[in-house]
Image (cartoon, helix red, strand yellow):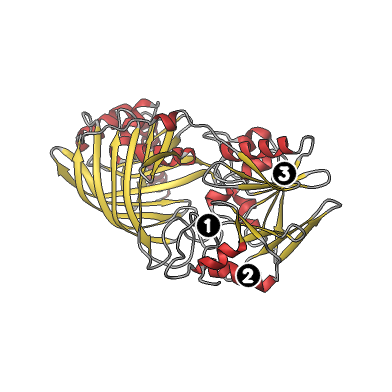
Amino acid sequence: MLRSLVVVSLAASAALLAACGTSANLDATSLLRQSEAAMGGAALKSIQFTTRGSGSTFGQAFESGMAWPRLNYPLLTRLVDYENAALREDFGRSRAEPNGGGAIPLMGLGEQRATTFVRGDLAWNLVGGNPAPAPVARFDRQHDIWTTPHGVLKAALRNAASASRRTEGGQTRSVVSFRQPGVLSASVWIGADGLVERVEALRPHPVLGDVASVTHYSDYRDFGGVKFPMRIRQSQGSFEVLDLAVQEVLPNAPVDITVPDAVRNASERVSAEKVTDGIWFLAGGSHNSVAIEMADHLMVVEAPLHDGRAAAVLAEAKKLAPGKPVRFVVNSHHHFDHSGGLRAAAAEGATLVTSARAQPYFERVLANPNSIAPDLLARSGRQVSILGVSGKRVFADTTRTVEVHEFTGSIHAQGMLMVHLPKERLLIQADAYTPAPAGSAPPAVANANHVNLVDNIERLRLGVDRILPLHGRVVPLADLHAAIGRR
């Protein structure tokens, strides 16, 4: 009996070693070519697919660390140009839950419609029919090209892939892994029929560092010899972002995605408007910041979007007060568009001032490596220092007093902070109120975020003459009151 067990054990070991040897010697290129043939993708230069379903707003969680706010997608169309590494996306989407951020109208108040692009390393949006650079979206949109079922095979074939066999749920699949320098690393799971079932990827992100995504493809159908999945499910940063039913597929769709001159020639521009002595409103982009001069240092409110924007803001602030370092950078809230420059601020040596409830989240995610496209923090070698605010915190010296207050009752985000300068009677805030163009009539229904801001100003008994919004223009408090129908 013992002898038979030994024989069985040796046989099993031999089989395992043989299997490992087979995995080690798998020819990734042959596997990819076979998969490409099974999917009809060898001659595929472009593809357009139209979908509908559900999803969520990546990076706009109501509370840091929670799932992204859920959305409805009545329309999402992607046109992918593999030859030129280009993508156009048209979508309409609306909220499926009331809380959380993003540019989507509040619950029940309509849809957000948008058209977005990327070609190579340049990303942009259409805003009012005009192209607007969107460099922060570059990595996301490149990811969307090279994780499509056919795109991931093309990327793997170009990038010295390796292959292995993996067993999951009793089924063995081929897994091909590769790294596209500066863009992403990915593993593509290929079924016995040669169809792409799953893509696991890492890509750079200004807040999360190397952020993981998993995309599942199923229910393939044939479109003129090209097989394409009829269901697409995707998660990013551990939470679902898409669950789409494909309605229409057009292989080798006509495509002409050309980079506009306004995008090709764009650079980060920071305009400094002096609000009063030692306080400057830093605008010139979609997101504003504020520089506050103290006796021997600077405070900057908001390091938005990504390294490029935040570095330009910090450089401009230091020019305005020569010789004074940026010691504190205040973050209004944890949404990615408002926290995307915190790594750059930490690389500068600044202490980050966040809400206490978001502090553990930032300590965790800002410690993540950004290995695919090393950012300013990764290159600086600095450690991140975070100061949490719960309720209220005061920064004061012989020059001025700066109060940082926590919102209550917001539907936009938990732990939102606003900055009050009591002597100057100024209030700095983000997303609770973005002024409408001058001369606009107040909305028929008061925006709940506007009402909440007024409630917080009154609750805290803040003396405010002007609002410095982190979107839009400087306005008197009266404009906020008018926006909620108060005379």
Image quadrant occupied by the C terminus = bottom right
Q: Position of residue 73 (x, y in %)?
A: 32, 57
Q: What residue type is disc 1 on?
A: Thr
Q: Is residue 352 visible?
A: yes
Instruction: Please identify the quarter of the rendering in which residue 260 is found.
Output: top left
Identify the element where label 1 is drawn.
loop
**Dot 2 crowding, Cα within 10 Å, few <14, some 14–19, many 20+:** some
Q: Which residue is mark 3?
A: 350
Q: Amino acid at mark 3?
A: Ala
Are dots 1 and 2 in contact, CB under 8 Å?
no
Residue 273 at what x, y percent from top left? Answer: 64, 44
| Residue holding disc 1 | 434
Seen at 21% across and 28% down, the residue is 43
| Cα distance in 3D space between marks 1 and 2 | 16 Å
Q: Nearer the viewer, residue 373 or 307?
A: 307
Viewer-nearest of discs 3 and 2: 2
SS for callout 2:
helix
Secondary element under disc 3, as helix, strand or loop, is: loop
Inspect the image, locate mark 2, and give the three-letter code of the amino acid beneath it. Answer: Asn
Q: Nearer the viewer, residue 116 or 320?
A: 320
Residue at the spot 31% in from the left edge and 31% down from the top edge: 154
State the residue position of label 2.
456
